[in-house]
Image (cartoon, rainbow, N blue to C red):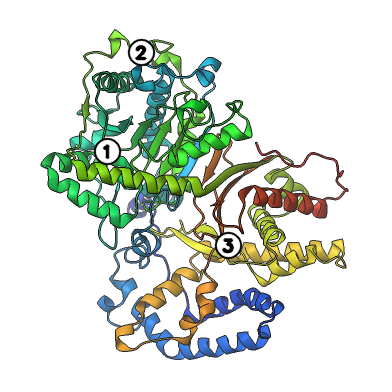
Amino acid sequence: MAPSAPSRRAYSAAANRLPTLPRLPVPDLHQTLSKYLRSLVPVLQEDEARGGAPWRSALQERQRWAVEFEGGLGARCQERLHGKFCEKKKALDRSSPRNWLDDNIWLKKAYHEWRLPLLIHSNWWLAFFNDDRIPEHALRQPPSSESAQITPWQVRRAAWLTFRHLEFRDGLARRIYPNTSRTGLWFQEAVAKIFNTCRIPQPHCDSLSPQPPSHVPNARKILVMVNDWTYAAEVYDENRRPLPVHDIEQRLRSVVHDVTQRIQAGESAVPVGILSADHRDNWTENLRYLLSLSPTNLKTLQVIQQSILAVCLDSHTLGLHPHTHSQTLRSAPAVNSPAEIDCHLHNIRSSINARNRWFDKGYTIIIETNSRAGAMGEHSPCDALVPSIVADYAVTQSIVPEMFSLSEPPSFPSDRDLNVTGWERLDWVTDAHIEAECVAAESRAQSLIADSDDSVLWFSDYGADWIKSIAGLSPDAYVQMALQLAWYRSRGGFTATYETALTRAFDKARTETIRTLSEDSRAWVLSMTDATATVATRLALLRRAIKTHNSLTREAATGRGIDRHLLGLRLMMRPDAGERAALFDDPLFERSQEWKLSTSALSAGPLFRGTGFGAPYHDGYGINYLCGPDLIKFGIESKFSCAETSTRTFQNAIASALREMRQLCSPEPIRRDAPAVARL
């Protein structure tokens, strides 16, 4: 029977209604406290094993504190946060337009109040595979002494990657991730935060620059950095239509030609960008001083902040041509060797000396002279999974020669690079004070870079397919257990472990913590070092630990995690009114959040050579991993200056853990002489 006209209209309206994302919930107070206490069990057990108080009595004391908190101050803090029974405007959740956490707390506390340099400490980095359309000689040939050391294929790849990133952004709503699903809605909002944005250094707490309307001329430009000079190049026309890729290439080539002429005329750039690699308070003061020197500097800064993204053309290939940098190698490593990939990763992370970068920029494409490329980004606009998806699209398709005016780029210099419009210089007005500050900032940056023990591990024995089909386990939880075992093998104990969970099911939400260290993960790790434990016992404990981890992951992803809620509760306290909680004054509260093993997973990453982020603690590790069907890649960062950490040692510990786990989960014994790991 056909529906009536009114019912047809109602059906049509419902079908055309776009989806909406629900608000991030404020978790139940009792549930959060119960989960928090449970997360303390392995820490207390470890304390007891090292001569501390019996863990049960230590837990009981904290249970009393939790009961006291829940029945008194905690209930008041929960009411201030949630406001279930108070007037609408008084509660943080009810007064927040979209999200109690991210509208008010997260950017400030997780990112913008931190004063450490963005270099290594905060920014993420991602190295792309080489483009298979670029000839082999371009991957090995050193740059000419002319043309500012920039090579034709380097510029072509820069143009192509820029074009592909713009193509992704422009096609996002139409065909890639339309907003007709909740996933599409979340992803569109997340991607929008990457482009046309920049972090702004400010006293005590930074901010993000507002994104310009599309009709603003700067919103059509990209930032281009060459030999520490800054330029802007238009990549859209006045009608907001993207330019053809050959036009983008021509504008980049013309910028390089201009840099070459400046060098030949004896000019050198004051490397103002290096100031963005410095401590945030230093950068805040130096930027304030820069803006006081000339109105020109404010205009330059506005272009940088409002531009779509940054493109950095480096005048070197780190590691391939040893004479181009201070980290001299005896011989250049072979292309695609482990050493060469690590050099590539280091350049994307920090360059040789943090020069030719603007670390505040939301998204930066970096291309070396031999066309190696990657991306680096400021972490606060969105989490690294989002730009990795954008980058994956950009790298998926190799250069299409037919889309350029010439199938092979001509050598520099070329008459085709003259009289090209659509680009501009962004020159800074500086003085002796700023020049001295640049020298000092570079010295501090070089110290950070020299201390960063950063490397990629490619574990090639097996990957997600084997873990799922043969072991019958969750690949992510499996890798997390391998990291727990690796830490214990290399450090002789346990540590609080952070894994990122995306809360993308909720409006404007970001992340929650998965506390990998659990009573069950600890029990399994100890069984692997217990000579009396049987294979059956170890396997049963591993499966239980993975089941627990999967449960913690689901809770975190669905708004039922604990760490963001605990943060909110603490911020609702009023110390000026004498409010204190024994639960939060407990040293164990802080220790349970010292993420010396800080981890995050990306996609399978078949087009990425490596990725990474910095260790948040001096004696810890920052680990990003990509679990592919047959290959697991780990990006690991630690500090050379810490005697307790070694990236190479931890790589070996991870490989050994994965070997042990495969043998434990295999229906048939693994040959001991079978190849286990390749650092490449």
Marks 1 and 3, Cα distance to the nearest angstrom? Answer: 37 Å
Quarter location, residue 309:
top left
Residue 277 image point, x, y percent: 36, 47
**Relative horizontal placement of residue 264, taking residue 675 as reference (left or right):** left
Label 1 sits on a secondary structure element that is loop
Q: Is residue 339 visible?
A: yes
Name which residue type carries label 2.
Phe
Q: What residue sits 46% from the left and 21% below the top?
A: 399
Foreground residue, 676 or 36? 676
| Quarter the C terminus occupies | top right
Label 3 sits on a secondary structure element that is helix
Q: Nearer the viewer, mark 2 or mark 1?
A: 2
Categorize mark 1 by other alpha carbons within 10 Å: few (<14), some (14-19), many (20+): many
Quarter location, residue 478:
bottom right
On screen, residue 87 above or below 419: below
Name which residue type carries label 1.
Ser
Residue 79 image point, x, y percent: 36, 82
Mark sitting on residue 412:
2
Mark sitting on residue 553:
3
Name which residue type carries label 3.
Thr
Marks 2 and 1, Cα distance to the nearest angstrom? Answer: 27 Å
Marks 2 and 3, Cα distance to the nearest angstrom? Answer: 53 Å
Foreground residue, 541 or 530? 530
Q: Which residue is mark 1?
A: 307
Q: Are marks 2 and 3 in contact (CB under 8 Å)?
A: no
Q: What residue sits 37% from the left and 65% below the top?
A: 109
Foreground residue, 306 or 360? 360
